[in-house]
Image (cartoon, helix red, strand yellow):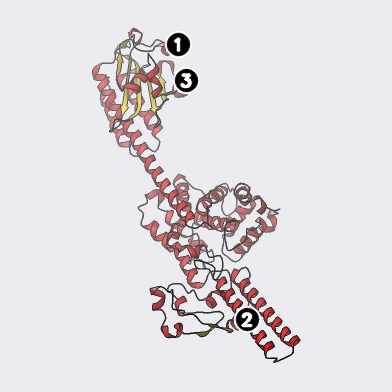
Amino acid sequence: MPDNANIILSELLNLNNRLIQEPDPVLFIEKVMQLAARAADADGSFFFRVTPDKYMNLQYSNIQSLNAASSGLNFFDGVFIPDLKHKALRRPAEICAFSHDIVNVANIFQSADIDTSFISKFDEENNYATVSVLAFPLLDRKKNLMGVVQFMNARGDNGKIISFTEETQKMLISVCQLITAALERQRLAESYTQLLESFIEVLARAIDAKSPYTGSHCQKVPIITRMLATAAVEETEGPLQSFEMNDDDWYALHIASWLHDCGKVTTPEYIVDKATKLETIHNRIHEIRNRFEILRRDAHIEYLQKRLHDTDSKENLQAEFVATVKKLEEDFAFIAQCNTGDTPLTEKDLARIDEISSRQFVRYFNRMLGLSWNERQNIKDPETYSQPAAEYLLQDLPDQLLAPFNQGELHNLKITRGTINKEERQKINEHIVATIDMLKALPFPKELANVVEYAGSHHEWVNGKGYPNGLTGEQMSIPAKIMAIADVFEALTAKDRPYKEPKKLSEVLSIMREMKNIGHLDPDLYEVFIRRGVYMEYAEQYIDKKQIDEINPEEYL
């Protein structure tokens, strides 16, 4: 040990304390190598990093007398460690990596079992003389190879090159164990990060897979989120000029955008996939069509009976029958159109539904047959259901009113906008509450503390009319408002939703402009979204080319 042993020990203790706090392992390794070289008074020092897939690469190098640090030395080509078994002679670092042995030689050129060709070439090219060499492997607690450390040309008190003593060797191994600890900590942190991200991705893909119609929503929202966040950070003037994000903010936003819909695991598939108003597990419009078929057949029978009994002229009876059939066809076409939810219903439409529903047909078969136990429990008068009776064309029957969702035909057909009734809408809205509850239950580290806020606010409106908490724009963070725009844009551009046809990009932007005008979307971020062409950057890569039409951005600001 050199005379400044106390100083070296003090620095070693300081490095040990910095092990947990040092965010950059490369910088930490450099400091450890510098300290070790000073402690041994070694002229040359090298660190070879071993990757999990068994490649060894030179990460740090320094030769003091040549004033050559890492950037100035191209000293060692990376090697695949398993390939070393085919080499008769190996370099010192290769011996350590392959056999986990320690190499300590007083004069490397006097060791016949070591490959010195590369050292000879280096010495000749740099007018240098390599003599003593010490190399040893760095192994973690499970004996996995993390790296190899190599020192050369130890110097004595008079400055002459000496061998690395056994005491110096033990000291250097002890000092360099800090590198092992740093690499092990980094690898463990990376493993946990990979595990977390893989779990999040698996969960997001499972949510998307739950419904064939939301195929990649959870996977695409993060893409739009990052694009818009990047554009917002790059703003140099206006309301967003001071908006910045550090590494933790970016990572939290990344995690939040992947998990923003994790609560959808609690939403029944038929509601998520509900393409028509009468859809439960299947589209019940066919049941109603059959009733219209019955009424048409009844009308035909009535016509034939009147012809048989000559109650009126043939011409009048035919005209009456044709008019009845035409009315049935028109009424069914209207009901079928209402079922799709494509067009909002007016008061006149609702009145017509009521008028159609008042028509009756005769049911002859027992309605109690084939019902589940739960359905039978909801019928107060089973005797009425078991006897032939007249029934209304459109029905809200007791066995259809199963909690928590009202499956009544009339109730659902009278949904004025879209295909989801109020009970189903409430259940869908609950997914964000479920998301918040699920995320709150996770022990996120401090740097991910904002994940819950970012993910849980993407259905809030800046005017305070969103859900679940009715937050205003002032109460929402910018990343949360970014996610709200990303969620809307992906949903509007998606071509795999059963309840709507794929929209042209111009239609999507028109809808979003209106959403901005009524206080749904943040106006400043919306302007960045349009002005910086985020919508087009995403569209060109991820939406159907047929949906992309000519856009004049000024029209949508």
The tally of labels here is: 3
Look at the picture and state if 359 lies above or below 119: below
Q: Which mark is residue 318?
A: none
Q: CA distance from mark 1 to mark 2?
A: 95 Å
Label 1 sits on what residue type? Answer: Lys
For the N terminus, the image quarter is top left
Sooner in the amino-acid sequence: mark 1 or mark 2: 1
The answer, for residue 265, to whether it is visible in the render is yes
Image quadrant containing the C terminus: bottom right
Q: Residues within 10 Å of mark 3 (few under 14, many from 20)?
A: few
Q: Residue at x 47, y 74 (%)?
A: 406
Q: Is residue 480 above or below residue 236?
A: below
Q: Position of residue 463 (x, y in %)?
A: 54, 66
> CA–CA distance between discs 1 and 3?
12 Å
Relative image position of residue 214 (x, y in whole percent):
53, 57
Pointer 3: what residue?
Answer: 74
Residue 226 or 242: which is nearer the viewer? 226
* Residue 360 percent coordinates (x, y): 57, 84
Q: Secondary structure at mark 1?
A: helix
What is the three-letter code of the residue carrying label 2? Answer: Arg
Residue 273, horizontal then vertical, whole percent: 52, 62
State which tag comes first along the sequence, 1 or 3. Answer: 3
Picture disc at residue 352: 2
Q: Residue at x 45, y 53 (%)?
A: 206
Asked where in the image residue 179 lies, by quadrant, the reply is top left
Q: Residue at x 61, y 75 (%)?
A: 335
Can you say whether 387 is above or below 502 in the image?
A: below
Q: Secondary structure at mark 2?
A: helix
Q: Amino acid at mark 3?
A: Asn
